[in-house]
Amino acid sequence: MNCLFCKIIAGDIPSTKVYEDELVYAFRDINPQAPTHILVIPKAHIESVNAVSADNSSIVAHIFEVIAKIAREEGLENGYRVVSNCGDHAGQTVHHLHFHILGGAELNTQM
Ligand code: AMP
Ligand code: ZN
């Protein structure tokens, strides 16, 4: 499958790993928009939030447990933002579900 994030999970494209388990992979964004900018992705190829269903939503629940763990380990005790862009109007560029963790400074409040 011609998916950038599937290739990152497979190790065919290098990434800076932050966390990994049997379901989830997390790595540093190559073009950080905040001092800490991490992407958390399911190992299973899920296109976007639109493709979340009863069959795979347990993976998404697990991703949020991992997000909280990563935030603690990265020292984001002053807060952080979790973002998932879905579709063209949101500017989704990689069509493999991913959650951005943004933190390490006070973030712009604009959406
Ligand atoms: P989105 O615009 O929400 O689809 O987010 C895609 C994100 O993937 C962007 O923030 C990119 O900077 C990031 N990205 C693209 N290629 C890579 C890569 N090879 N390694 C790490 N992050 C990447
Ligand atoms: Zn994929």
Image (cartoon, rainbow, N blue to C red):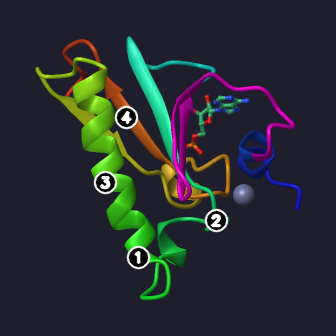
Q: CA distance from mark 2 to mark 3?
A: 16 Å
Disc nearer the start of the sequence (3/1): 1
Along the line of sight, the residue nearer the viewer: 96 or 56: 56
In this rendering, would 103 be left or right of 96?
left
Q: Over which residues does the magenta segment extend?
A: 10-28
Local SS, label 2: loop
Q: CA distance from mark 3 to mark 1?
A: 11 Å
Query: Label 3 crowding class (10 Å Cα cut-off): few <14, some 14-19, many 20+?
Result: some
Disc nearer the start of the sequence (4/2): 2
Q: CA distance from mark 4 to mark 2?
A: 19 Å
In this rendering, would 74 be left or right of 56?
left
Measured as percent of width and height from the top left, residue 21 is found at 52, 49
Residue 15 picture quarter: top right
> Which of label 3 and label 4 is nearer to you?
3
Q: CA distance from mark 3 to mark 4?
A: 11 Å
Residue type, label 3? Phe
Residue 101, disc: 4
Residue 64, disc: 3
Measured as percent of width and height from the top left, residue 69 is found at 28, 38
Which residue is identified by label 2? 44
- In reply to whether residue 15 is colored magenta, the answer given is yes
- In reply to whether residue 87 is colored magenta, the answer given is no
Residue type, label 1? Ser
Q: CA distance from mark 2 to mark 1?
A: 12 Å
Q: Quadrant of ligand 1?
A: top right
Camera sees residue 97? yes
Residue type, label 2? Ala
Query: Label 1 crowding class (10 Å Cα cut-off): few <14, some 14-19, many 20+?
Result: few
Which residue is identified by label 1? 57
Q: In the rendered image, which quarter contains the N terminus?
A: bottom right
